[in-house]
Amino acid sequence: MDEGLLSQATRLGPVHLRVTDIPAALTVWRDTLGLALVNEDDATAKLGAGGRTLIVLHAGAQTPLPQKSRDLFHVAIHVTSRRDLAHAAARLKASGLRYSAQDHLVSESLYVSDPSGNGIEICFDTPERFLRREVSADGRVTLIAADGSAHSALEPLDVPGLLRDLGNSGHVEQRMAADAFIGHIHMRARAPETLMEFYVGVLGFRPHIQSRTFGMFDCGTARRAHVIAFNIWARDELREPPPNAAGLDHFTVELASAEELAAVALRLDAANAPSKKVNGAVETADPEGNRLRLVVQEG
């Protein structure tokens, strides 16, 4: 492992979200997206796939997260086959929910929100289509495909073409693929450069895209370049979420070893970043108040 950098085994664990109404949220997370309900009580609902918890919903929010609020933009659940993405698209289409779809060249993605305004992405990675990234002198980012064509990474996804991957049987899987995982988390930000100083300089993620012109900053690991992302697309319209709004409660970063967790704790202390140790985990918050919990991976 490079000194001061998180290992490539670093991954995201459960993402905790505040919602105004758990039963209403389950109509999206469970009934449409197909996550399995692991456990539910009056205060929380845990959902996952393949026996692993991916999302934890917390009751108590008093108002949905308004659009263009500084907070969660979306949490991304990644699937490992295009057919799994097609099943998700079919479920979304049948649900009647409003959703969108984009072709990012490095991935294909479906977007929807739960009734509390929490953004959700279902993503299938397509690195084999990507050749290189070009950044112009003025900061504009262009992706070059393996065939040499240039892409904005924001083209619409051909959903009818995606659905043809399901064939003619008409069968649609109603459950999220068992090997789905939390691939990245994306927030709206005020000062992304300051946030990247925290995630890269203190926590130890590797920088990836850093472009005010494109409006996005992200970082990751040697294995996954896009793990934590921030955008400034709302620009001057960005607002603080109202008190007790829905949105991100906290997310989990799973580290490879106890030694790596201890090293991160030392860097947080050296940077005078607020942190505390709770039951073997380190809890902290970034400079804009997004909370995260760092733990050692199990298994």
Image (cartoon, grey):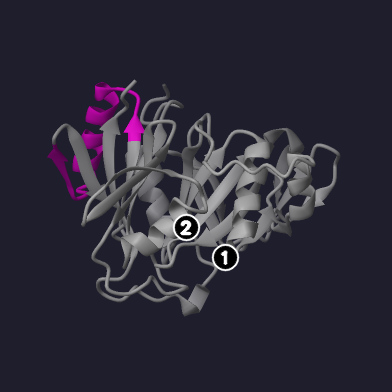
Q: Quadrant of residue 155?
A: bottom right
Horizontal side of 243 relative to 97 (left or right) equals left
Horizontal side of 25 relative to 259 (left or right) equals right
Residue 30, image x and y in percent? Answer: 44, 50
Q: Disc 1 marks which residue?
A: 97
Image quarter in which the N terminus is found: top left
Question: In terms of depth relative to the viewer, which is nearer, 182 or 81?
Answer: 81
Q: Is residue 271 above or below residue 100?
A: above
Indicate which disc, 2 or 1, sits on the residue closer to the N terminus. 2
The magenta segment: 254-278
Q: Is residue 227 above or below residue 139?
A: above
Q: Is residue 85 above or below residue 295?
A: below
Helix, strand or loop for disc 2 = helix
Q: Disc 2 marks which residue?
A: 28
Q: Is residue 74 visible?
A: no
Q: Amino acid at mark 2?
A: Val
Helix, strand or loop for disc 1 = loop
Mark 2 near mark 1, Cβ–Cβ under 8 Å? yes
Horizontal side of 87 relative to 239 (left or right) equals right
Q: Residues within 10 Å of mark 1 (few under 14, many from 20)?
A: some
Horizontal side of 236 relative to 276 (left or right) equals right
Residue at image x 68%, y 50%? Answer: 104
Q: Quadrant of residue 59?
A: bottom left
